[in-house]
Amino acid sequence: MTENLTLLAIILGILHSGIRLATPYLYAAIGETFAQRSGVLNLGVEGIMLMGAFFGFYATFQTGNPWIGLVAAALTGSLMGLLMAVVSITFQAEQGISGIGLYMFGLGISSLLFKTMLGTVEGVQGFRELQFCITSSFCLADIPVLGDVFFNHSLLTYGAFALVPIATYVLNKTTWGLKVRSVGQNPEAADSLGVSVTGVRYTSVILGAMLAGIAGASLSISLLNIFQENMTNGIGFIAVALVYFGSWTPLGVMAGALLFSSINALQLWVQVLDLPIPSDVAVMLPYLLTIVALAIPFRRSLQPAALTKPFSRGEN
Amino acid sequence: MAQENNLLPSGLPRIESLEMRGIVKKFPGVLANDHVNFDVKTGEIHALLGENGAGKSTLMKILYGLYQPEEGEILLNGRPITIHSPTDSINHGIGMIHQHFMLVDNVTVAENVALGLKSSRGLRLDLDVVSARIRELADKYGLQVDPQAVISKLAVGERQRVEIVKALYRGAALLVLDEPTAVLTPQEVDDIFVIFKQMAADGHALIFISHKLNEIFALTNRVSVLRDGKMIGTVNTADVTKADLANMMVGREVLLTRHRPPVTVGDARLEVVNISANNDDDKPVLKNVSFEVKSGEILGVAGVSGNGQRPLAEAIAGLQFVADGQILLEGQNVTNYTPAQMFTSGLSYIPEERMHDGCIKDFSVEENAILQDYVRRPYSNWIFLAFNQIAQHAQKLIESFNVKTPSRETPIKNLSGGNIQKLILARELAREPRVLIAAQPTRGVDIGATEYIHNQLLHQRAEGLATLLISEDLDEVKALSDRIMVLFGGEVMGIVRSDEVTVEQLGLMMAGERAEQVFAAA
């Protein structure tokens, strides 16, 4: 009986962490979905996240207000996106290479700024967990069993999940979404109808990067409330993989993000409980899953046809 | 009613006249349009005729705002207008149907039409409103389209209708049709011509770009001929003959008919027995294809583009894995040989994509002349290339096949399409093959070079070569082939004698009817 209760507690713990840890993946991967649907592969998500994480943290640290931190992270992300857009859309640089450049840039600058402006790891009071208290004595978070799983997260986590239906709607039901899908599939056709391919790609890349900046902030001012050098630790690259995994749809991305973060949570619990599995193997699990998921071939046909291909008018 | 108001069935005003005056467009090293004058009126179908590279597409891209001219003006109903982008030309009532469909293939017809337009609901798409208007237009013009259909599921003929609806929806009063029949079966061409004629009768102005003389006579009122960027002249279609137009296009007399004398047919050189193959997505592209080509015979392969012609050519050339069945070359089993093994076994191959598969565009003419044989004597002694031998060989090919090139050292990409194709043909024939596969040998090649290439193929036939001629140009297939095989969906619909079949019957087979059905009906 006690064993069962412990098991239940562990499962609930994994569910709670899974939902919580999905936050940065969701922001980053849904942002990347917009960029890729418009035909631009932005591999620099990781670097943008680091910049967003730093400036989000720094602004919160200075002002004590996480909302100002969030705005700072979004702005930083947008500027990084603008940089990516100029290099890859206007100057038509090889997208994979310019993305890696952007990553190195973000990694280097955020580490430098950390050393010069903070010097040491500090903590801040970021976004708090919401408890959804209906009366002073009853909160939804107190509901037995599932209350904690669903009703004890920060605003940024709920925002990340709210983004899924919003992004789906924007992509499929708005004129701008149709333009995004079209310039990523057949930019010549869009151009021949008077759609500005460059304009749509710029806005998509910048929007995506803004969300990547927020993804970074979700770590530094919501989930962890600290900033460390290279604190994203590969999340940005996994987010790019999640876009492929999710077949370029927000819903698919969410499924991937949840699967990934749950396995991540599981691996944390494996370490916590000191199960007889080497921790290195446990840490490897999520990445192994990524490779397996990306090897499934049928998804490739869903890829936007013009992904990574620069557009210039008049070429056939 | 509409006629009296000078309105089109779409409810929009007509374009009474459109005139382009003194248009000049330069590209690096080329004068693409040299003071070109051109005009079109309401109710008229005006053909724009010329060889590849004559400047037809350039002129129309200027009209549609894709290029900016260096000089010249455009007058709409007598008043000068400026066109800086496709949006400007769309706003003036000009629509264009491009040679390659400009459709986003993973979304619906309605979404393609709505793309780039203002929605009646602001930021939200109004696809139901768009669909209703599409149905209305489709009704008025007799175009069958389903607004809800996804483009990738549509046949080419249907996609063509979507393009027309798209232009009409945007209020096109003048429609530029850039080789609109290139991918259609003869029946689909007939259907679309009925629509074009009705549109002209309703008061639209149509510009029809083509190099197919038959179509020009079937459809148009006037013809303007461009050559080397200059306007050679504008004539009433009824006043001229095909030969007149061909002469205007090429600038000299050309023979439009081919003489295919009877020759004695020998043993089977190429036998293909029940081969099947799949593409990279594991979808079948060839299903139980069987045929043979004999010495002294040209077997034509007809079919709408994408029905297995390319996999067939590549399977024989060793570029496509054959999952099942056998390929025999002079009785020897050569199934799934590598391309190099095929070449040494006596096969020559003129690939469909000549710039991609047929030559290396940055290499010189002489390097391209020995692409398969660079490792063999006399062009190489295992370590060093024998430049003298290579130069001599290239010079021989250039002279005997009349290849116009500034020098042997010129990169091949600087030659015209016709001359590149002549060099490839020369290279392949100089290898004295037993079997030749000629895939789209005259696509994008000017009439003069086409005439030359056809005569060479017929000459080699008389010498006993077995030729598999794959072409989407039915006139070419009919004129050169002894027998014609029709492919549909990777299957053989039938093999018929060329002089016992009509273009209409071939068209039915190209649309998926078997020869037995077609001939039973006739």
Image (tube, rainbow, N blue to C red):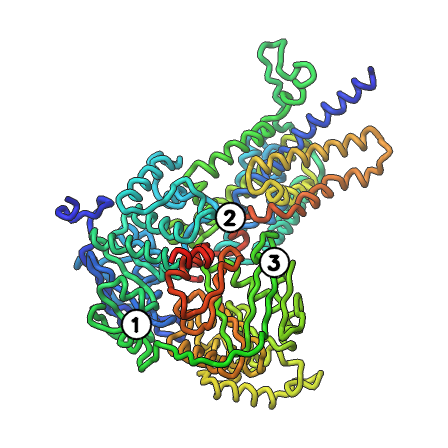
Instruction: Measure the alpha-carbon separation of dots 2 and 1.
Output: 46 Å
Residue drawn at (49%, 85%), measured in percent from left and top?
Answer: B398
Residue carrying label 1: B226
Q: Are marks 3 and 2 in contact (CB under 8 Å)?
A: no
Pick whichever, B473 or B327, lies toward us.
B327
The spot of residue B289 in percent (x, y) is: 57, 61
| Front label number (2 vs 1) | 1
Residue carrying label 2: A82
The spot of residue A297 in percent (x, y) is: 64, 48
Residue carrying label 3: B277
The spot of residue B26 in percent (x, y) is: 35, 71
A54 relative to A169 in the view: left or right? right
Quarter where residue B429 is shown: bottom right
Pick whichever, B289 or B413, lies toward us.
B289
Residue placed furthest toward the left: B4
Q: In the image, are marks 2 and 1 on the same chain?
A: no
Amino acid type, residue under disc 3 in the picture: Ala
Amino acid type, residue under disc 1 in the picture: Leu
Instruction: Measure the alpha-carbon separation of dots 1 and 3.
Output: 43 Å
Depicted A183 relative to depicted A142: above or below: below
Residue at mark 1: chain: B
